[in-house]
Image (cartoon, rainbow, N blue to C red):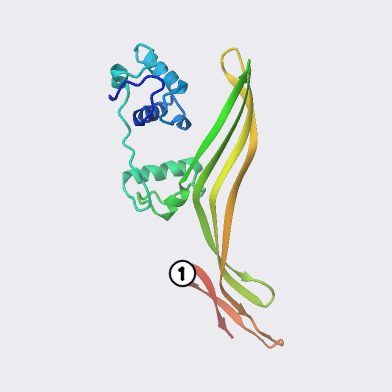
Amino acid sequence: MNGGPTLPIGSTGPDVRRLQVLFVMMKEMDDTDIDGTFGPKTQEAVKSFQQGSNLTADGVVGPLTWKALPADPNTPRLSRGASGSAVSGLQKGLRAFGGANSATDPGPIDGSFGSRTESAVLGGGQVGYNWQFGRLVAGFESDIQASAMADSACVFGCVNAFFIDVGNVQQRLPWFGTSRARLGYVGDSSAMFYLTGGVAYGRTETNITHLLTCCAQLEGQSRISLYRPRVANDCVFPSAAS
C-alpha cells in the first residue's frame, strides 16, 4: 500500500522517480528508465499495472493506483564503514553476480563494508537509442562505469643472474565501458530477434614499488651468498647468509 500525488504523463520530480523505482522492483521497467520524468514508458508501465490490478487503465496515477502499489523499499545508503544485515545482503548479491574469486567477490560475508567490499562495487550509466523501420529495428547503446576494483601482489625473484628484486605491484581499474550496435527483426508475435556486437574499453593503472634490490656476490667458485626469505608486512624480503 502506498500514497502520493496524482501523476499524469508529463509530470516530473521525486514522486515520479519513486514510482519508477517501484516499477523496476516489479520488473515493469528497467533501471535505466529511472529519470524522474513521466514519459511514454512510465505511462505504459502504469497502464499495464492498472490492467493487472482491475483498475481503469488510463495511465494516470491517482489515489486508487497509489493504494494498489507496494510500499517504497527501505534501501539504506551504504558506504565504507557501514555494517549490518544490509551490508551482508549486498555482499551476497555481489558474490552471486560474479562468483567466488571474481572482481565482484567481496570476500567474507561478514556484514562489514570494508576495502574488499568497496573494490567490488561498481557505478555508472548507460545511454542508447533504437530506430524502427517497419519490422526492422536498429539500435546503439553505450555504457561507462567507475570502478574501485584493485589488487596488489608482492613480487620476489631474480632480475638477472646476480640480482634479486623485491617489489609490490598494485593494479587498479578506475573505469571501463562498452559500446554496442544492434539489428533486429520484429515477428508476428511481437517478439524481436536481434544480433548485437561491439567493443569494450577501459583504463588500467599499474604501480610497481621496488622495496629492495640486492646483489648476490659470486667469489670465484668458492663461495656464494645465500638469501633466505623472511616475511614482513605480507611481502617476502631476502636476508643474507654465507
Residue 240 pos. (x, y %): 56, 82
Residue 167 pos. (x, y %): 56, 69
Crowding at dot 1, Cα within 10 Å, few <14 / some 14-19 / many 20+, comes out as few
Q: Residue at x 69, y 75 (%)?
A: 161
Q: Residue at x 59, y 40 (%)?
A: 178
Amino acid at circle 1: Asn
Q: Residue at x 47, y 48 (%)?
A: 120
Q: Please say if 95 is above or below 23.
A: below
- Mark 1, residue position: 233
Q: How many marks?
A: 1
Q: Please say if 146 is above or below 211.
A: above
Quadrant in the picture for the N terminus = top left
- Is 90 situated left or right of 67 in this image? right
Residue 2 pos. (x, y %): 28, 25
User: Does residue 107 show up?
Assistant: no
Nearest to the observer: residue 48 or residue 125: 125
Q: Please say if 48 is above or below 222.
A: above
Task: Name which quarter of the figure residue 88 lies in.
Answer: top left
Nearest to the observer: residue 189 or residue 105: 189
Task: Name which quarter of the figure residue 53 lies in.
Answer: top left
Task: Name which quarter of the figure residue 5 lies in.
Answer: top left
Quadrant in the picture for the C terminus = bottom right
- Is 237 situated left or right of 118 in this image? right
Element type at marker 1? loop
- Is 220 situated left or right of 89 in this image? right
- Is 96 situated left or right of 201 in this image? left
Residue farthest right in this picture? 220
Nearest to the observer: residue 18 or residue 193: 18
User: Does residue 236 show up?
Assistant: yes
Residue 223 pos. (x, y %): 66, 87
